Image (tube, helix red, strand yellow):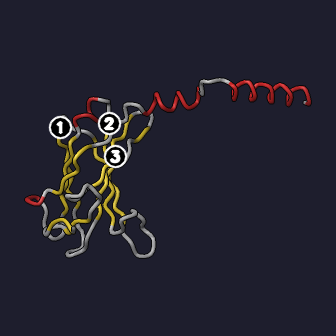
Amino acid sequence: MKHFTYMLAALLLAASCSSADPVRDLLLARTANLSAPEEVTYDAPNSSATVLAVYWDATTALENGAVEFHIDVATDEFFFSGDGGTLITRELPVSSSPNDAIMITGLTSGQSYFIRVAAVYPGPSRSEWAYLNGADGKPVAVIPGKGLVE
């Protein structure tokens, strides 16, 4: 056992002295093409007081092999469902449209919601989140049927 411990220590030391990190390289290679959806947009014409419609540019995600989109709608800007907050999660298979969309129904009239979308890839792997943003480029809430809260 003592011999094994010395061998393991030697291997770890040799690996740490190497200029290449194979685990890091593998993770970077695996996530390099995990493009996030772009331009998450509030769809006012298809929204109402209790229905929230959003769409996003899925072009790059589709080109890189996305198989579905993960959508979160929350009453909390940190997408936390505790302390009375609401978090609604949906999975949407990709379509052939460069602008995928979803309608979330049964929402509370007058309540503001935050929205984020991620592309899901085989593996499974997920892209970074894309948020519904305001004019300043920062995540913003929306009140269904009324518009962005800026």
Q: Which residue is mark 1?
A: 98
Tell me: 117 left or right of 41: right
Q: Is residue 45 above or below residue 150?
A: above
Amino acid on which disc 2 is placed: Val
Q: Is residue 12 above or below residue 130?
A: above
- Crowding near pointer 1: few (<14 within 10 Å), some, many (20+)? some
For mark 3, give the secondary structure: strand
Alpha carbon of mark 2 to alpha carbon of mark 1: how far? 13 Å
Q: Which residue is mark 3?
A: 118
Q: Which residue is mark 2?
A: 67
Alpha carbon of mark 3 to alpha carbon of mark 2: how far? 11 Å
Tell me: 5 left or right of 56: right
Q: Which residue is rendered at x = 33% and y = 69% of the image? A: 75
Residue 89: x percent and y percent? 35, 57
Q: Earlier in the sequence, mark 2 or mark 1?
A: 2
Q: Nearer the viewer, residue 92 or 19?
A: 19
- Crowding near pointer 2: few (<14 within 10 Å), some, many (20+)? some
